[in-house]
Amino acid sequence: MTNPNPESGDIKQDEVVEEGMQGADGNVDANGLEADMTEAEKQQKLRELRENLDQ
């Protein structure tokens, strides 16, 4: 949301957000996995997440 005057505390509550995350299509569950991912893609995602945690 855009705040044209940050000092005022006013925030446009009715502003329509038309942009999303790059590559997002809204087809992702709570775990961040797409519903149509293959088992191999899920395993790759799990490996990437584990690598990120190890860093």
Image (tube, helix red, strand yellow):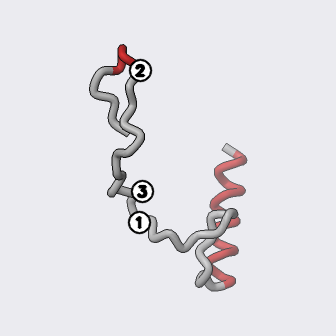
Most foreground residue, 50 or 29 = 29
Q: Mark 2 — residue?
A: 9
Mark 3–mark 1 distance (CA, rounded to whole Å): 6 Å
At a point 69% along the width and 63% down the height, the residue shown is 31
Q: What amino acid does circle 2 point to?
A: Gly
Mark 1–mark 2 distance (CA, rounded to whole Å): 32 Å
- Residue 18's place in the image compared with 24, above or below, is above
Q: Quadrant of the C terminus?
A: top right
Q: What amino acid does circle 3 point to?
A: Met
Most foreground residue, 28 or 44 = 28
Mark 1, residues whose alpha carbon is within 10 Å: few (<14), some, or many (≥20)?
A: few
Mark 3, residues whose alpha carbon is within 10 Å: few (<14), some, or many (≥20)?
A: few
For label 3, the SS is loop
Labels 3 and 1 touching (C-beta < 8 A): yes
Q: Which quadrant of the figure has residue 27? A: bottom right
At a point 42% along the width and 56% down the height, the residue shown is 21
Is 3 situated left or right of 29 in this image? left
Q: Mark 1 — residue?
A: 23
Q: Of the residues under marks 3 and 2, which one precedes in the sequence?
A: 2
